[in-house]
Image (cartoon, rainbow, N blue to C red):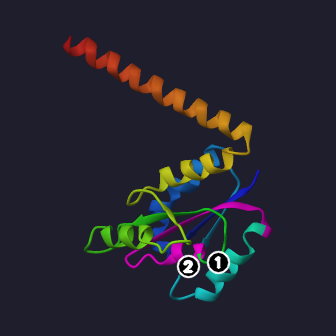
Amino acid sequence: MKKVAVIMGSDSDLPKVEKCIEELKAMGIPCEVHVYSAHRTPDDATQFAKDARGRGFGVIITAAGKAAHLGGVIAANTTLPVIGIPIKASALEGIDALLSTVQMPPGIPVASVAIDGAKNAAILAAEILAVSDEKLEKVLVERREKAKLEVLEKNKKVEEMFN
């Protein structure tokens, strides 16, 4: 199975990014976690992106707040899928990071999840990897079935209370 890289622009993003790491591990997806800044360590971030495919990565997840250029810097230096997690880290409630993540020029896409959407970033990465991994696809199907049953159970309880 290909690995997933999880890169955050600052270790202050870790409390939000941990949900992504936990989700990847729960699905049995190997991952590496790093801190690289688009502005403070641009050479390191660029080199990581350039080497990622050769190091066995299949998807790169980036998390950054405010200017949130990390996803774009990584995407500009690899053809691997890049998923951006805009982090709420300023007076603008994460809207600045969201716009920086999704407003990429043609030819350098960064997929984006919701502000602080770390769990969905992990699930999207799993779906990308599952295109060529039947075992992982089965894990995803089973997780959706479990979620469905949980909602139906909650529905049953509410119906019993009010109907």
Report the quarter where the C terminus lies: top left
Labels 1 & 2 near each other (Cβ < 8 A):
yes
Q: Which residue is mark 1?
A: 77
Q: Is residue 35 visible?
A: no
At horizontal 80% and vertical 69% (from top left) the residue drawn is 54
Q: Is residue 110 above or below residue 47?
A: above
Residue 152: where, in percent of width, then height?
40, 21
Which secondary structure, mark 2? Answer: helix
**Where is residue 45, by image quadrant?**
bottom right
Q: Is residue 49 magenta?
A: no
Instruction: Kindly identify the residue that appears in the image at 74 percent across and 55 percent down.
Output: 2
- Range of the magenta residues? 54-75
Magenta segment: does it hold 71?
A: yes
The picture places residue 77, in percent across and down from the top left corner, at 64, 78
Q: CA distance from mark 1 to mark 2?
A: 7 Å
Amino acid beneath label 2: Val
Q: Amino acid at mark 1?
A: Asn
Secondary-structure class at tag 1: loop
What is the crowding at mark 2: few (fewer than 14 residues within 10 Å), some, or many (at least 20)? many
Q: For this view, does 3 lie left or right of residue 96? A: right
Residue at 69% across, 82% down: 47
Q: Is residue 65 above or below residue 120?
A: below
Q: Residue lying furthest left in this view?
A: 162
Q: Answer left or right for 18 relative to 161.
A: right
Tell me residue 132's x, y (percent): 73, 45
* Residue drawn at 59 percent across, 77 percent down: 76
- Which residue is label 2 attached to? 73
